[in-house]
Image: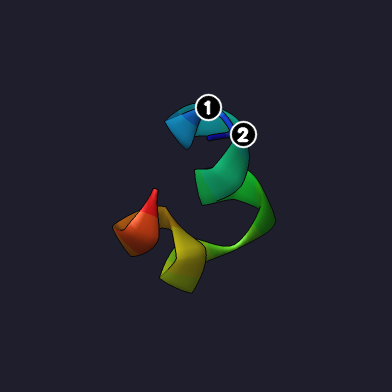
Amino acid sequence: MLPMGLRNRVSGKNSRSA
C-alpha cells in the first residue's frame, strides 16, 4: 500500500487503514 506518511497527509481517516 501507499506510504503512511503520504497517506496521512492526503487523508487523515485513511491513515488508520494504512
Question: Is residue 4 shown above or below 7?
Answer: above
| Residue 14 screen position, x and y as percent | 48, 64
Identify the residue at horizontal 50%, vertical 47% (top origin). Answer: 8
Residue extending farthest to the bottom is 13
Identify the residue at horizontal 45%, vertical 34% (top origin). Answer: 4
Q: Number of callouts in the render? A: 2
Tag shown at residue 3: 1
| Residue 5 screen position, x and y as percent | 50, 30
Q: Are marks 1 and 2 in contact (CB under 8 Å)?
A: yes
Identify the residue at horizontal 68%, vertical 53% (top origin). Answer: 10
| Residue 2 screen position, x and y as percent | 59, 33
Tag shown at residue 6: 2
Residue extending farthest to the front is 1
Q: Secondary structure at mark 1?
A: loop
Amino acid type, mark 2: Leu
Q: Secondary structure at mark 2?
A: helix
